[in-house]
Amino acid sequence: MTDVVATNETILVVGGGISGMTAALEAAETGKQVVLLEKNPALGGRTAQLYRYFPKMCHPICGLEINLRRLKANPRVLVLTQAEVTGISGSAGDYTATVKLAPRYVNENCTACGACAEAVKTEVDNPFNYNLGKMKAAYIPSAMAYPQRYVLHPSIIGTPDAEAAKAACKYGAIDLEQKEESVEIKAGAVVWATGWQPYDAAKIQPYGYGRYKNVITSVEFERLADPHGPTGGKILRPSDGKEAKNVAFIQCAGSRDENHLRHCSRFCCMASLKQTHYVRENSPEDGKSTIYYIDIRAIDRFEDFYQKVRDDASVSFIKSKVARISEDDNGNPVCWGVNTEGYKRYSNAHDLVVLAVGMEPSVKGVAIPASIVADSSGFIEADPANGAIFGAGCATNALDVNRAVQSATAAALRAIQVVNKVARAEV
Amino acid sequence: MSANQEMAVRYKNNFLKEVEQQVEMGEWVKMCMQCGVCSGSCPTNFHPGWEHPPQEIFMMIRAGKREEVLSSPSMWMCTSCYNCIVRCPRKLPITHIMHGLAEYAYELGLAPKVQPTKNLSKLFWENATKTGRINELTFSLGMYFKDAEGKINIGQGIKKGLEMQKVALGLLKAKRLNLFEIFGGHKCKDQKGIHAMLAKAYALESKRKGRHVG
Ligand SMILES: Cc1cc2nc3c(=O)[nH]c(=O)nc-3n(C[C@H](O)[C@H](O)[C@H](O)COP(=O)(O)OP(=O)(O)OC[C@H]3O[C@@H](n4cnc5c(N)ncnc54)[C@H](O)[C@@H]3O)c2cc1C
Ligand code: SF4
Ligand code: SF4
Ligand code: SF4
Ligand code: SF4
């Protein structure tokens, strides 16, 4: 059984992305007890799946590294992975969360030697790479994974593959008897930081995502550019593995659209501007990017970043939301539309089309297992009716990392105030 | 003063307001964010006669290009395929606005003189409202024997009639066309009532929009 010591002076943080980690650390570093829950087998959330960060174009690894170091140094944070909240009851200062813990089948003895992965034959989709490419069913979620421990995919449990993995492990780290558990965790305040998910691009029917192989999403493009990704960092298009040199970016794919997400997702203009750097980095001689946009929303201090991309001769801008995409005989996606500057019709073939998909909350307001006020897109609103459950990061709005971290710090401060009050009452 | 002059004076330099108040669904025009999806989706876009795609028409309205918009053949080219409505991220009822603009231009006498859709619509309306039922025979004959400007043209009528002979025979066989319709054909019982109803509707509509009944 997993033992969790928690009281109503504990702060429960749900979601171990950059926002959840930040909130947990900020609270713990002021001396509070924190339990940090993450649904996946490793912390980091979606930022860990990015190749580089705007605006500085640094690798997300370094930001994550700093947070992980703070986390390892802090005995007041208890991290539980593969943990999902199924219900929250109680009120401010006195909550009880019911948490489902899925089995990892690998215990603390694991040294991440990788012998089990070699022994296992079954391959499964790799969610870290947004299912571009496969991985072994005994795996470490990513090179940066914390905890640095392997996982057995539940699909091989009870098969000879699981036995093979167990036999290969020299450290007695594989425990096939692990079962799903349910634990109750007490908390005075809850920080809800379950983050976001990319809007389902297949719902934007005229763009043919799912029908045309060379129409991909921006999150998939991050994986293609990453040296740790499925193509080793080469931007190869899915249909034939050809190097993609002429890349189109379609803005507001699913955002600012009454038929899809009503809100502007805020980060996707910057994400595409950033991704034009990847194209140039991959093909310095003849890489070409085309951004189809309604208007570019590079908010406040990002204007400089935008101007630099504007000045780049390898990037062109077409003021038009693409009406539809078709595919030519060579498997090239063709963008159809009308350019608002002059109202001229175009049909342009590209090697690859990247849909700058919008951001929606990964857990929609109504699906949060407690009564919470959320907006029409499902993002958590700051509302006194929420008691001491505070939204943080992309669970509250479409935000970039900088803003997500700010919002996490704010949520931590609110949570701290609640547990301080509980503590005072108990003296 | 003509209806056109009167409206021009009433709304002075505010064509957007004029469209909002006078054109069916015109109040939606200001919601357009100029994304271009409607124009890119329109199958008739850039066909001969389709001067301005819907997106451009909406921008021209905001820019106050009154004469250019109202005398344009563009909105008469709309086939009501509804592609634009389905895809518009702002849910503008584009098709209906196009028809609304066409109707308003016609009311003001600004619609293009030679416009097949306009002629067809006029013929259809007159035919259907006369008896309360459309008379397929007189309607098709009316189409064949009138030229693009709406004038009778016997030679053209005979030529077109011959071209369509096979179709007509098929329709006769299938009892979709009845030659006796030439003597008036099927009609509604209370024709007077229908005419009174239409006149009343027209008067109410004109009053609501502050137009003179003419
Ligand atoms: C293509 C692309 C490029 C981007 N590039 C940049 C960039 O260059 N710079 C930048 O600043 N921002 C960028 N962003 C935005 C950035 O990804 C987000 O700001 C960031 O991920 C927000 O972090 P978060 O912790 O709020 O959410 P997430 O990263 O989504 O983390 C949420 C965590 O909660 C976990 N979780 C979800 N549900 C549950 C549950 N029920 N129980 C427990 N845990 C749960 C998830 O597994 C996840 O680990 C980009 C986004 C995209 C799509
Ligand atoms: S489970 Fe065992 S074999 Fe697999 S990585 Fe860990 S220590 Fe190595
Ligand atoms: S940030 Fe840009 S691409 Fe994203 S929804 Fe807003 S305008 Fe569209
Ligand atoms: S699709 Fe809608 S919002 Fe876009 S230009 Fe057309 S009318 Fe305007
Ligand atoms: S309904 Fe009319 S304006 Fe709209 S796409 Fe079809 S033809 Fe074009």
Image: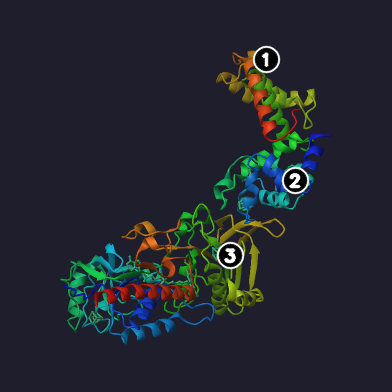
Crowdedness of circle 2 by 10 Å Cα count: few (<14), some, many (20+)?
many
Chain of the residue under the numbered disc 2 shown in the image: B
Name above or below for residue B202 compared with residue B81. Answer: above
Q: Residues within 10 Å of mark 3 (few under 14, many from 20)?
A: many
**Left or right: A142, with A337 as reference point:** left
Q: Is mark 3 within 8 Å of ligand 3?
A: no
Mark on residue B182? 1
Circle 3 sits on which residue? A350
Front residue of A212 and A43: A43
The amino acid pointed to by label 1 is Ile
Q: Quadrant of residue A120?
A: bottom left
Q: Quadrant of ligand 1?
A: bottom left
The three-letter amino acid code for the residue at tag 3 is His
In front: label 3 or label 1: 1
Place of residue A211 in the rendered image (x, y in percent of width and height, measured from the top left): 47, 56
The colour scheme applied to this rendered structure is rainbow
- CA separation in Å, label 2 and label 1: 40 Å
Q: Chain of mark 1?
A: B
Q: Is residue A91 left or right of residue A231?
A: left
Q: Is mark 2 within 8 Å of ligand 5?
A: no
Q: Kindly state the secondary structure of the residue where label 2 is placed.
A: helix
Q: Report the quarter where the N terminus of chain B lies.
A: top right
- Front label number (2 vs 3): 2
Judging depth in this view, the residue of A114 and B185 nearest the camera is: B185
Q: Can you identify the residue that label 2 sits on?
A: B69
Q: Alpha carbon of mark 2 to alpha carbon of mark 3: how far?
A: 36 Å
Tell me if I can see residue B174 in this picture: yes
